[in-house]
Structure formats: C-alpha cells, structure tokens
Image: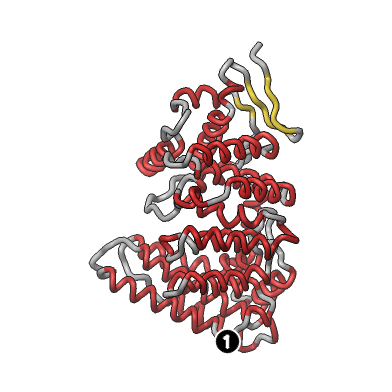
Amino acid sequence: MLLFARLQTALSTRLFRRAPDTLSRAELDRMSKRIILPSLPVTDEELARAAFQDRGQKLARQEDWSTLAREIAQADAARTGTPGGETAAMLLAYGARGDVVAAAEDALHDGKPPVQDGLAALEENATEAAETADGPDAYPCALIVALAHMDVGLAWQAAPRSRALGDTPDRARQSHHHFTRASELLAPFCAKTLGAPSLAAAQCALLAGQMVTERQVADKYEALVRLDQASPRHLRALGRALLPECGGSHAGLDLEARRMVALTRAHWGAGAYAWVYLDAMSLDPGCVARLDPVFFGDALRDVLSRCPDQHVANLLSACLAAALRDETIAPDIRKELTALLEWALANHLRELHPLVWTQALHRPDTGVALPSRGALLRLGRRAALGTIAQVFADKLADGSSIAFSPAGMYRLPNI
C-alpha cells in the first residue's frame, strides 16, 4: 500500500500540477465521471509483445538455441513487429535473457553483487550454439548475450549505494566491464551486411556505456533507421539518446529529427519529427521550447493517418499530455500543443489503454518500486480521464457527457 501511495502521489502531482487555465483536481474528478470511454485492461499490443517475449523465454529455458537463433534472424529479415511498432527480434531476445537479467537486477536492488553463474552459463550456451550455426543464424546468440551484459551494466549504474556494492567508481567499473564485453561480442558482426536491424539497435544501445560525440550517436542511429524505417522504436530511441543528460543537445535533437524526416518520408511522411521528439519532450521540458509546433502537428497527423492503431493514438496523446505538464512552456506553444492534443483525442481515440498513460507519466528510473498491475491500471485510467476532462472542460461544464466510439467523439447533452 505504501508503494501504491507513493506512485499515486507522484502521478497526481504530475498530472494535476497547476498550469494556465487548469481546473482543480476535484473538478477534474467530477467531470471524469461523465466521460464514456471503453478501457482495455489488456491490449492487442501487450498480447503481441508477450507472445514474442514468452517464445524467446521458452526456447532459452529449453536451451533450444538453434531454433531461437533462426527465429530471431527470420524476424529481422522480415522486419516483423507488433501493431505498435516494437520489433519482434528484440522482443524474442528480451525474453531469452529475461531470467538472467532479472536475477542480477534483483540482487543489485537488494544491495548485493549479482552471482555471475547465470550470465556465464547464458554466454557459454549461446557461444556453443553460435559456433555450430550457419550464415545469418550465427549473430542472434551473440546478440542475446550482449544485450544481457548491457542490461546488467545499466543495472549497476542504477544500483543503490551499499557497502557490498562499493562506491560510485566501483559500480562504474562493473558497468564498464559489462559494456566492454557486450562490445566484444558484437564486434565480429556487421548489421548492414547481415541486414539485421536488431544488431544495429544493439550497437546503438552500446553507446550508453561509451564516451561518444553527438555526431557519432546520430550516425549510428541513421544507419539503424536506414535498415528499418518502419519501426518507430528506433526513432524514439534516437530522441532519448540526444537529450542533454545523455551528452546531446536540444539543437542537435531538432536537427536529427528533421534529418530523419528526409530519410523516412516514403514511409512516415513528416512523422519521424514527432517520433524523435515524442519521448524526449516528455522527459525534458527544454525540448518543447525548441520544437516547431506547426511541423510537429503535421508530423503527428502523418503518423496517425499511416498508423491508425489505438496503441499509437494512446501513446501520442499520453506523451503530449506529459509534455504539457510543464508550467514554463511558452503560451503560444502551449496553445498549439493543446489544440493538437484535443484533435488527437477527438478524432483518433476510440479506447483507453491505461498502462500507456501510466508509463508516460511515470519515469521508470525514479527508484519507486511499481505496485500491482491493477493499481497501475487504475492510476493510468484516472490520469487519462483527468487529461480528457481538462481538454474538453468547455463541453463538460454544463453537465453534459462526452462519449468515444469508432465514429469519433460526440457530446451527450445533460437532460
């Protein structure tokens, strides 16, 4: 209950922070009761992701590395993904390493160095399988182990202080060791030659443990996007990688967002501009001041016209709402973004995906342990309905209701 209360407080503070023309929390709660919107506790996107992750986990537990490697390579070659744009190859690899990484993360969270037996066994089994694999089936095994090392390296960076884990330099050395090993495992393979976006994505992920320039980051991600223009996952990751806290800059982020538009115009129109900014602007308020709101609006419309999936509609709306929490946004930009959020909700939202809203309003690296799934669903639903009530307050103020359907949003007068 304490964890639930902490997260509820964090979400409420972020969602109901007073901004220009903001209603009180009590007023929003009252209006929320007059919003008719179907809510899905489990979505098609979640089911698709779980299917690939479970498949990877099952094959790894059965030590059927040849089948796992073949399926990852096939998913890469076919650019298989979920309805929301997550890549199947990376989801299979995530499931395959999940047990080992979870054990290491749990140990570090408890202030203890992780036992290396699991990671060593994973590497031994994967190496043996890679040695007997032919052609493109050789790289997936190295990919899985490299990603596991990176996950453990990031876990060391985020580990709490404890005598058993040592001071900050000790944790940094452990993290560096894992990233170095990941780099060694990936070095023999060329993503471009193999036509393997998952390999290129892993090589981009390596940058988190290296001292690199903004230009090097941009070039790595450009190579990745050239291999797989259809997946928004890579564009969103580029935006996060170019944040100032990661060594980038707002100017560099805007430049690369525009370059990605030119690179992916055949698939996304101007949509890449929105994808690159999407996570970045909800994590760093400074991004909002830099973006071109008119161009961003065109980009958002292109995304929703090309990908009319409800996961995407919820994601874009939730991230816009998260960005609008910042009180320092210039009035003209706030007006443009609020109008864009209103348009997206009214014209594209048909069902509510609560977990998407929870994730958009809660950074996973804040150190707050997550409560139950049911609690997260309730928090996400309340956050979403509060946002919708704020946006459409003029339609709800007289006691009317608003409903969402496949035909769009419509108003039900108070009788």
In this rendered view, identify the residue nearer to me: 62 or 30: 30
Q: Is residue 30 above or below residue 328?
A: above
The colour scheme applied to this rendered structure is: secondary structure
| Residue 398: image location, x then y, percent | 58, 15
Q: Quadrant of the C terminus?
A: top right
Q: Residues within 10 Å of mark 1 (few under 14, many from 20)?
A: few
Left or right: 84, with 167 as reference point: right
In this rendered view, identify the residue nearer to me: 381 or 209: 209
Q: Residue at x 62, y 35 (%)?
A: 342
The quadrant holding residue 81 is bottom right
Local secondary structure at mark 1: loop
| Residue 46: image location, x then y, percent | 62, 51
The quadrant holding residue 228 is bottom right
| Residue 135: image location, x then y, percent | 70, 85
| Residue 218: image location, x then y, percent | 55, 69
Q: Residue furthest top?
A: 415
Q: Residue at x 67, y 34 (%)?
A: 346
Q: Quadrant of the N terminus?
A: top left
Q: Amino acid at mark 1?
A: Pro
Q: Which residue is mark 1?
A: 188
